[in-house]
Amino acid sequence: MNKRRLITSALPYVNNIPHLGNLIQVLSADVFARFCRLRGYETLYVCGTDEYGTATETRAREEGITPQELCTRYFEVHDEIYRWFQISFDKFGRTSTPEHTRITQDIFLKLHKNGYITSHTIEQLYSEASDMFLADRYIRGTCPHCGYEDARGDQCEHCGKLLDPADLINPRSLVDNSTPVMRETEHLYIDLPKILPVLQEWMKDAADRAGWSRNAMQMTNAWIRDGLKERGITRDLKWGIPVPLEGYETKVFYVWFDAPIGYISITATLRDDWESWWKNPENVELFQFIGKDNIPFHTVIFPCSLLGSGDNWTMLHHMSATEYLNYESGQFSKSRGVGVFGNDARDTGIPADVWRFYLFYNRPESSDFTFTWKDFQEKTNGELIGNLGNLVNRTLTFITRFYEGRVLPAAITDEFWRPIGAAQAEITTQLENAHLRDAFRKIFELSSYGNRTFQAAEPWKTRDTDVVGTHQLLSNLVHLIRDLAILCSPYIPATSERICGFLGIDLPDWKALGSAEGITHVDSAAILFEKLEDERISELQARFSGTQAERAARDSAAAAAAGEPAAGEAVSAAEAAPAAAPADANAAKAGAAAPPELPLDERFHARVDLRAARIIQVERHPEADKLYIESIDVGEEEPRQIVSGLVPHYSEDELLGKTIVLVSNLKPAKLRGEKSQGMLLAASAKNADGEETVEVLFLDDLGDVVPGSAVRLEGLPEPESFPSKLKVEDFFSMPIRVEGNQVMVGGRPLLCNGKAVRTETVASGNVG
RNA sequence: GGUGGCGUAGCUCAGUCGGUAGAGCAAACGGCUCAUAUCCGUUCGGUCGGGGGUUCAAAUCCCUCCGCCACUACCA
């Protein structure tokens, strides 16, 4: 009677390592799949790496290996991480398989046959030398905006502007160094507007039947309301699925078209009867677990591909779209390497079940959630250990110690079990709806109920006066623990198995809930989890702060600066905060409320994040007389661009290679069209004739100043974080003075590397 | 710029169809000793981002402003 359940989680792009935020989707589907199996549904959970596309092709080219080799390498990284987290895939596959090619081409050909494919001719750069069209990234040339000579075709790394490769001056091919020419090329498009009526027909009952999350509905409706457009589905690449159509032999499908088809093809690599899952809507329900950034692809584009093919596909039933997991005061970021990644979680030595516990206890189900190490510690110690772990431990040790481990049969009493039955029914319903977090919290309420009962009955007092009654109470609790093991097992499977081991049973299925049979004896009991101690948490928090590049820099700096441990500490603490710039609510409130009351020096210190930075490139602003555009190294992964009005005062050579003081958390601005991510500090004074003297604050005389080092006021503690987008007015409202060649704010000298920042020519004046 | 989201207790988050603002943690106090300094109970704590509107009644619906985030755009 029950339908079979087909479960997917979003295919991770193979090119990078998943962080905790990404893992939530995979883990969510895992919990749901484990629950479905325990409830007796015939269940299939598939996932795998999404491998085709420009990103992997380019990366492989850079590393001098084939895309397939690159993908295999990364596939193994993914695979290993998911294994460590005990994800119970029926199949974790990949998209670079013959099955994938076959099914993708089949769907395409049917779309084509049904008139849902159009073609348009566009102009694109072409390499005559290599006889191929060039993807945007394979072209470099001079940026028309900033004059940078090595700008990439899709975006200039120097000024950050998005480019059309056709705009590049003197374009050249990265493949063969030839000069590409414009040539017409024809690309295929999927005609979404034409499929729309079919989509709407399907959506009419699909969405409310399965209760899509609100954000999924909103986004989908907004998409459709704003009008669907034809979307290009081909690219002039090699690493992809060939387009099986005459005249398109040199093209492949664009990765977003084939990626979701991976769900299907990966199933096909697992079993020959894959169509009994994917072309069987009468008997199969499809549950998809994704992040909210992926919603339209799964509710609009992919369904359109399937519907347009005309086959009788198993369509999306339930859509579970999680919100974002943020990290400490910022966001997880793959590109910047901020946060805790799958391999990091493993390297902490904290067991997978503890991570699973925390991620589900706080699953961002209806709004974003912020991961903090402190909260991780509190929830683990308080809830997982203090509540569940303690109930298991106190009950089992009690029954072992005072009853030789014997458990009474038929220990059911209505008073004890009725609330449990009600709670279990609720938990089951919530799990059916994939409300994984609410269900999990309810399970912990049930555990708390056990602790409360234990406490109220005071068996340590009654075991002599009411021998049988007390033994019965404990037996009841043992059966409750058995139930908790069942309920928890989708979330923390290894722990459930251990608990069952204590009880001398195999993990029962869902039907065993509420029964008093099956347990006669407690075999053993052991501590389930180690507490997370303060020192360990502080250590992890420090270790995983900042970007991965900063972590590496910190490690090497720590090694180098062995003689100055204190300074090393200060630097690492300083780097931790500003990298994760976006201020959390607390910091924002504090920042807004505090300044007027604080004296100038403290206010400045709390708000302005000054950094040492090295000028690595200087050039004139093409559209301004006084402005230089500098590229500077602030110890971050990417150099920053700043613009400063120093042309009348300094030549390019006088600036190049120098180390300056940067206001690093200034809100970025555009000066004459050029992005400026910060401001360098310079002192100025007027001489007797009214002429202005300007002196940039150089740090080169202060010894080896590492780019990115903090520049701080003397004698104030390092702030925990800074405002991320300090307004210019704010900054200028806090005057920096030079007095006696010493740079001061509110009477306090400015230090870098433990030495005072000094001027040479400007003995007194203002800095700005 | 467009689209969507978010802003609720010190912290992290719930709050359904408009009907007396909730939980957990933290803090303070009390109790217990089977248990990993664990557990149980009590208390404290909010101008629901600001302002306006609709309504007998607004965290909830409408308008507007502020702040933050994501996606997107030949915006700079």
Image (cartoon, coloured by chain):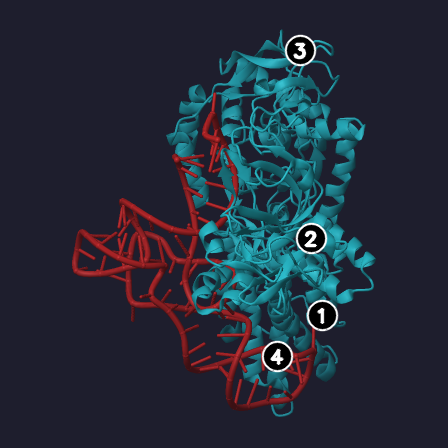
Chain colours: A cyan, B red
**Disc 4 marks which residue?**
A472
Q: Earlier in the sequence, mark 3 or mark 1?
A: 3
Residues at marks 3 and 4, common chain?
Answer: yes
* Residue A533 appears in view: no
**Residue in the foreground of this view, choosing between A41 and A620:** A620
Q: Name the residue rendered at 52%, 74% in the picture.
A: A416
* Residue A623 appears in view: yes
Q: What is the chain letter for disc 2?
A: A
SS at mark 4? Answer: helix
**Residue in the foreground of this view, choosing between A667 and A24:** A667
Q: How far, Cα to Cα, is label 3 from label 1?
A: 61 Å
Q: Position of residue A263 (x, y in %)?
A: 62, 33
Q: Name the residue rendered at 52%, 12% in the picture.
A: A120
Q: Residues within 10 Å of mark 1 (few under 14, many from 20)?
A: few
Q: Amino acid at mark 3?
A: Glu
Quarter where residue A197 is shown: top left
Q: What is the chain letter for disc 4?
A: A
Q: Residues within 10 Å of mark 3 (few under 14, many from 20)?
A: few
**Disc 3 marks which residue?**
A249
